[in-house]
Image: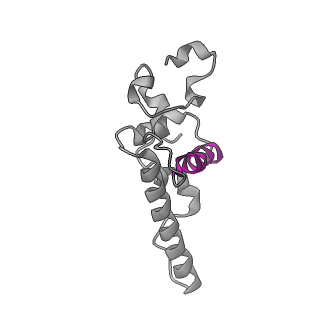
Amino acid sequence: QDISCLNRDPAKVVVVDCRREAFCLQPYNGLALPRWDGSSEDRALYDLTAFLKTIALSGVEDVRTVLENYALEEDPLAAFKRRRTQLEEEEQQRLAELAQGKKPTGLFLGALAGRIWPRSKQQ
């Protein structure tokens, strides 16, 4: 699939497919998800919604900087969930330290995008 013919800013386009070949012309615009097996237990679309919502709410100028961080992941949504869980745990620790009157050691929630996709080129 070639997104250059969409008449849209490629910085705002995400291609979702189960085959990396589907977005080989613009590899950092793609998100390769595991193929759906027909199971009613599959939560990939729910996880995808959370992932896309996080990107939208974080104010990322170029989605490719985020997707680049997940390009080598076998299951990018699982990687996103792991990073998000780690961030939430660190935030809970920071809040507990604040409640005890200690100087917090963790980062504030304002660093969300940098922690969920740490190698991205945030602007």
Q: Is residue 40 placed above or below 19 in the rendered structure?
A: below
**Foreground residue among 122 and 80:** 80
Check the image and tell me how it is coloured.
one colour
Percent x, y of residue 62 = 55, 33
Percent x, y of residue 24 = 40, 22
Instruction: Give the number of callouts.
Output: 0
Q: Is residue 91 placed above or below 37 in the rendered structure?
A: below
Q: Is residue 114 placed above or below 27 in the rendered structure?
A: below
What is the quadrant of residue 25 in the picture? top left
Residue drawn at point x = 58 percent, y = 57 percent: 110
Percent x, y of residue 94 = 52, 74
Residue drawn at point x = 56 percent, y = 24 percent: 10
Main secondary structure found in the magenta portion: helix
Q: Is residue 107 placed above or below 44 in the rendered structure?
A: below
For the view shown, which residue lies furthest in the top direction? 5
Q: Is residue 118 left or right of residue 99?
A: left
For the view shown, which residue lies furthest in the bottom direction? 100
Residue drawn at point x = 55 percent, y = 64 percent: 108
**Is residue 56 on the magenta stretch?**
yes
**Is residue 18 on the magenta stretch?**
no
Q: Range of the magenta residues? A: 42-57
Percent x, y of residue 42 = 51, 51
